[in-house]
Image (cartoon, coloured by chain):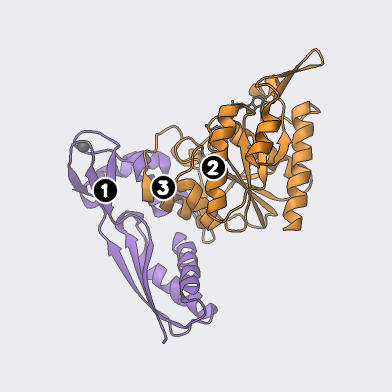
Amino acid sequence: MKIVIFASGKGGVGKSLVSASTAIELKRRGHEVGLLDLDLHGPTQHILFPSSGRPEATREGLKPFLSPQGVKLFSLGYIFKDSPLPIKGKEKYGMVQDLTWLLDWGDIDYLIVDLPPGTGDEHLACIRAFKTASLYLVSLPSLHSISVVHRAYSLFKDEGHNPEGVILNMCWLKIDGRKIYLFGKEYKKVMRERGMEIVAELPFDPLLSKAPLKRSNSGYWRRISKLVAEIIARANRS
Amino acid sequence: MHEWSLAEALISKIEEVSSGRTPLHAKVSIGELMEIEVDVLKEALNVLAKERGMDRLTFTINVEETSFKCNSCGLEWKWKEVAKRMAKELEPYQIIDEGEPTTPFHFLPYLAHAILKCPKCGSRDFEIKSGNTAKLLSVVVEE
Ligand SMILES: Nc1ncnc2c1ncn2[C@@H]1O[C@H](COP(=O)(O)OP(=O)(O)OP(=O)(O)O)[C@@H](O)[C@H]1O
Ligand SMILES: [Mg+2]
Ligand SMILES: [Zn+2]
């Protein structure tokens, strides 16, 4: 099983959406996929993939939910819905550890992990539990976002977990065939200066807010497909 | 039964910390609020230890009393004191374990933070002072 982690120092940059899209695209290509939402305070995968069923368990562990696309899913949101989870420090670490062994994913080829924003206990617990995972950071192509993500990048690197690179999300919006760069174009230069590789550049797609998981022939999904091909190639190399 | 997956995780951990040496004895602590059946856990540990060739491994399992302390008003309370009256409130969060509705703490004790509140002031800002999750306390290996 290959493990792919999506992280970012920054919030709201599209980690969860890109995790979900990646999972769906991997499944479409014939791989068995699990998607683990490790956002303890603000889980969202249960909103992207709604299910009214109660979580179930067997002797082998907690059963993930199965989405209509065929992706196996787990998010704490399926258990505690909209309740806040004010959990701190060591306990967060413990919760992430519990989640990493508790789930019975069965035979999957890829486990996608969606991390919360920041660089704290969940992140460290996650890379300790999944030592062999490939790690991708997600950022907006804005200078602020890149600088925050660079901090996360350095942290992971110092912990001996080299990130594969950065996925830049919401780079441009296409209007009448013209690309409007939402945060300017300097990001390529900034990324080079920071020594971080750009693994993918994704457009802003207004249709995603209505139907975030509906695959189409849009620029966003074409680039997700390319990104997934890259993720597979890198996973097979390592 | 969660006891089996828990045993599986503990055995893997014991294997890891023994790093090639022969483990003889392991001490395990379980949080009271997890409502683990100690006999079932013990049996699962013994069966799995044998399966993995750890024939001489014995276990001590200790159930640690679960207690809380509120960061807002300072109240300290025990799970025992509130468990009965919490049963109803836990229902929407139950996990179906082999067909049986089971407390979510059985699997994820830290979910206490999403479900419980201080019995005095209603704050969610409390610590689990003792008896939270399942822990491997120590492993004695052959020298
Ligand atoms: N390329 C995109 N085009 C349009 N909308 C997008 C795009 N990427 C993400 N979004 C939207 O932006 C919002 C934030 O995305 P998402 O929740 O995936 O971010 P996140 O990094 O996981 O946030 P958090 O840090 O809170 O976990 C969502 O409403 C999502 O649908
Ligand atoms: Mg998210
Ligand atoms: Zn209180």
Q: Nearer the viewer, residue A222 or A127?
A: A127
Give the labeled residue for mark 3. A92
Work out how far the residue at label 1 is from the one at label 2, CA to CA, in angstroms: 41 Å
Work out how far the residue at label 3 is from the one at label 2, CA to CA, in angstroms: 18 Å
Q: Chain of mark 3?
A: A
**Could you tell me how many numbered marks the image carries?**
3
Give the labeled residue for mark 1. B83
Crowding near the residue tagged with mark 1, few <14, some 14–19, many ≥20 C-alpha atoms within 10 Å: few
For label 2, being within 8 Å of ligand 1 is answered no
Chain A tint in image: orange
Give the labeled residue for mark 2. A152
Q: Nearer the viewer, residue A205 or B93?
A: A205
- Apparent side of residue A143 relative to residue A94 in the rendered image (left or right): right
Residue extending farthest bottom: B143
**Mark seen at residue A175:** none
Quarter of image, res A209: top right
Q: Chain of mark 2?
A: A
| Residue A126, horizontal then vertical, whole percent | 52, 51
